[in-house]
Amino acid sequence: MRAPSVPVQVVVHAALIVFTALTLYPILWVVRMSVSPGQGFQSGLSPIPEHVSGEHFRAVMGTVAADGSWLFAHQLLNSIIVSCATAAVGVALATTAAYALSRFRFPGREAGMDAFLVTQMFPSVVVAVPLYVLLDTCGLLDSTVGLVLVYAATSVPFSTFTLKGFFDTLPRELEEAALLDGASRLQTFVRIILPLARPALAVTFLFSFMTAWNEFVLANTLLSDPRAWTLPVVLQRYVDDYGTQWGNFAAGSILVSIPVVVLFFALQRHFVEGLTAGAVKG
Amino acid sequence: MARIRLDAVQKRFGATRVLDRVDLDVADGEYIVLLGRSGCGKSTLLRCIAGLEEVSEGRVHIGDRDVTDVSPRDRDVAMVFQSYALYPHMTVARNLAFALEIRSRPRAEIDAAVKDAADLLDIAHLLDRLPAQLSGGQRQRVAMGRAIVRRPAVFLFDEPLSNLDASLRHHMRLELKRLHKRLRGTFVHVTHDQVEAMTLGDRMVLLDGGVVQQVGSPRDVYETPANLFVAKFIGSPQMNLWEAQGHGAHTRVQGVDVDVPVPADGKYTLGVRPNDVRIEAGAPMTAKVEIIEALGDEAFVHLLWGEQRVVARVDPRTAYDVGEDVRFTFGRAHRFDTTTGSRLP
């Protein structure tokens, strides 16, 4: 293929630089706000701070409860536990459900898939009150278990659809070969299908994790005890009726983003396309 | 090693009947080839033997067992898929070992079996590679190795050579033949390629529309096709076929008197293979040379015989000119019932 001409390359790169700057600018701006002293809103176009201070990070991370315990650690741990558990439960349920929907024909299959879609159409605000009543009845308000159940239930339909789409692309001959090799359905699923589904599982896990990690509306409704809060609820508390602590809010936003970025990089190597290359003719 | 017996096997997908009362008896150690066009039911029949498809009616026996309701994993059959179906995340060694690992065989036994299979198929140097790092021919060998590693009672091959290029296909045909000789297993091989069927099979089964058309040795099927379908399907170029009218010693094909070895009364379809059309001086019939196909070691001359066409296999060293008149006669001829298509005596 002929390389593009110099003017075309200049235009393309200029456009790419502009869009990269547009994407990075708000993030750099938040970084600036998080390291600039004071809680005021930093005006000015430059994303480079005039003075650098770690006071907001110290303030956010050093929050303590009335009893003197380290509140931020509790809240960070809540977020990690809730998000990991949501992703684990969601992926575990969605994987088996998606495999069944992809491979078996059974009564209610179509209706079940339609029902999954319908659940995706309601905003979380609509279900917040019924869920509150439900968790209250079960004694699961202000609990990690309650929140995980709610999040997992909401993430399963989307995860199931994602994974079903992936399983549909896996050649059935692989399972038939395993069956003839003497493997049971479960052995085939565990030893053949799941290793091949690793990229899809990684994506689904990350999606479920991020959904739970960033969720605010339900967490804010179902959690009232600061020790049970997750980080999005904590962040929102820096914005109140009497003013906004912009410095803390920005520092908190960056702290909240770090685990997701780390997880993305950790899972990145699993997002390998074409793991099934060589399975069948080609 | 085991005998396979199919009793009136039927397979329907909804209202569509894919196999219609198939009876078949495959002897222990026999190499049988299921041959037919795409969609004739040959792969479905193979999958019914494997247990990957449940039969709608009829029984499947492998050895002394009725395996109709037995799971594929307990039928003691191995299958080489058209797509090879190698486990892409496992090395060649693990692909070969999988069936034995699943059966929890001792490690030493697994290693020995993998080594034997790899040596037999000349893939020992590939054991640490992933399927994606192999060529088509190498994948094919690994797929065969996976089948032979646990020495099953029956080997099933679903168009195993169809993804290979012509020279490799020829090579692998010979390999299959050697493998069969060495393992003395019961082989069932599905193909749409008549050359594969003719060269590999002890016997071949011709299927059309889910119905067995003929079962016999390649020679038998070629020499005495049971019906018009078989006559057309086996042989390349296909058999010359004409509507004929016999009356005593005279046979007429669309108004032309022809000389057939065994004349018969009534209307029928006359069939003559191209190598039974003899072009020789003084022969009773005359035709005009239309096209000459020279293939190196053989040649086919397409003749215009009135409104009919005749294909004759000729010595490639004999020169013919397009438009030239030649005289010809028939060697062996076949007669088929025009209505039912079945062979007439």
Image (cartoon, coloured by chain):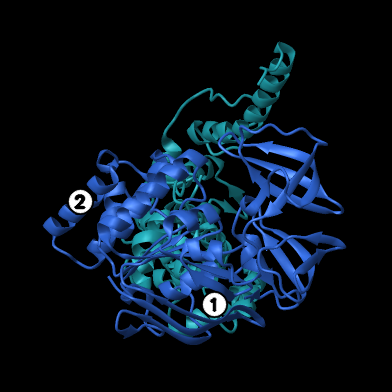
- Is residue B77 left or right of A216 when viewed as pictured? left
**Which amino acid, mark 2?**
Asp
Residue B266 in percent (x, y) is at 78, 77
- Is residue A84 left or right of B278 when viewed as pictured? left
Residue receiving disc 1: A132
Residue A136, placed above or below residue A179: below
Residue A10 in percent (x, y) is at 70, 15
Residue A240 in percent (x, y) is at 59, 54
Residue A32 appears in view: yes
**Which amino acid, mark 1?**
Tyr
Q: Colour of chain A?
A: cyan
Task: Assess disc 1: are there few (<14), some (14-19) or many (≥20) residues with their C-alpha within 10 Å of its C-alpha.
Answer: some
The dot on residue B116 is: 2
- Is residue B125 left or right of B302 when viewed as pictured? left
Closer to the camera, A48 or B195? B195
The dot on residue A248 is: none
Closer to the camera, B19 or B341? B341
Q: Secondary structure at mark 1?
A: helix
Q: Secondary structure at mark 2?
A: helix
Q: CA distance from mark 2 to mark 1?
A: 65 Å
Mark 2–mark 1 CB contact (< 8 Å): no
Residue A60 appears in view: no
Q: Colour of chain B?
A: blue
Q: Quadrant of residue A27?
A: top right
Residue name at image x 35 percent, y 48 percent: B175
> Label 1 is found on which chain of the structure?
A
